[in-house]
Image: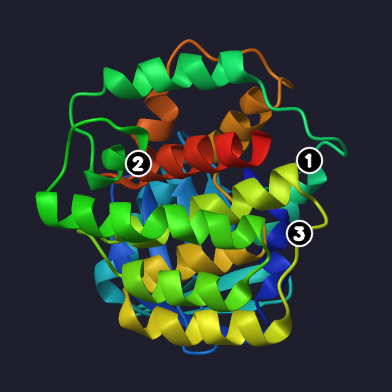
Amino acid sequence: MNSIWYASDLDYFESGSEFRVLSVHRDVINLVSDKHSRLLIIAVEGPVKGPSTIGLAEKDFLYLNGLISETDCFCLERERLNVYFNSGATSVIVYFGEKISFNVADYAKTEMAFSYESYLFYYENMKSWPSPSASAVLLNLPGGEEYFRNELSANYPHLVASLLQSDEEEFLKRCRKIIGMGRGLTPTGDDLIHGTLVTFRYFRPSFKFNNWTFKELLNLCNNTTKHGKHMINLGFHGLTLQPGLELLKDLSAVNEPVENMHGMFSIGSSTGYDLAVAVLYSARQIGT
């Protein structure tokens, strides 16, 4: 099998790394390794592209998905992902298809340019979404459980303010409060941290943490799911899903606003919504 596309950040994974299945969904297979805090993802060609991912044609994805129940191990070696199962083995040629970067720094503008018109457009989209998560409170919108709304209101604005002030200790303090908070494979708190980090990296390309902060943040990620840890790791390195990247471009007036946010909201049960909240909230704070 050959990839249709692949994420440019796959060189993060060491050759020889072994993976096992963490979760299987209609469009993606999530693989986990004891060596790495990021997941390796195999996805059908669409609908949403993102980091750490190998994209396959639908027929190849379905074939591989059909073998999952008898799969013993996945091993990434140089340009191949070898798949071992009960009765044999197969391989995916990773670096065959289109190479795509999901690093926001590759698309960031060198000068701050926040489009308030685009912000208002997306804010109106958020108001009409039928099933918002608790993160809606950050945009003064209804939705979600009261406990989570209160905790996010008490901590998330301070988290964003800490980044504006380059206060890394306060940032970690607020992360400690919301990492792992919420429901789903990637809890709302983790998605918000991810969205905040990539927004700062996009609008402030020189934005950086010291190595100590990254180590402490990874330690805090032991309090959440593997999916949540994956999202926070990506955010720290300025990597995000394609809909998140497009939203950042729209807010900096690089793109015209899209007609709707269906691609964003289709990510997970609430991940797309939470990511959009973080991007909108953070971008407006940076832009004011």
Point out which mark residue 138 bears: 2
Q: Residue at x 45, y 34 (%)?
A: 47
Q: Is residue 3 above or below residue 16?
A: above
Q: Secondary structure at mark 1?
A: loop
Residue type, mark 2 in image? Leu
Q: Badge 3: few (under 14), some or many (20 or more) residues near its Cα, within 10 Å?
A: some
Q: Secondary structure at mark 2?
A: helix
Q: Is residue 143 visible?
A: yes
Residue 17 pos. (x, y %):
59, 85
Q: Is residue 246 above or below residue 239?
A: above
**Image quarter in which the C terminus is found:** top right
**Image quarter in which the N terminus is found:** bottom right
| Mark 1 or mark 3, earlier in chain | 1
Q: Residue at x 45, y 76 (%)?
A: 173
Front residue of this view, candidates 43 and 77:
43
Q: How is the image coloured?
A: rainbow
Which-is-in-front pick, marks 3 and 2? 2
Label 3: which residue? 207
Point out which mark residue 1 bears: none
Residue type, mark 1 in image? Ala
Q: Is residue 259 left or right of residue 269?
A: right
Q: CA distance from mark 2 to mark 1?
A: 25 Å
| Mark 3 or mark 2, earlier in chain | 2
Q: Is residue 98 visible?
A: no
Label 1: which residue? 108
Q: Badge 2: few (under 14), some or many (20 or more) residues near its Cα, within 10 Å?
A: some
Residue 110 pos. (x, y %):
88, 39
Q: Secondary structure at mark 3?
A: loop
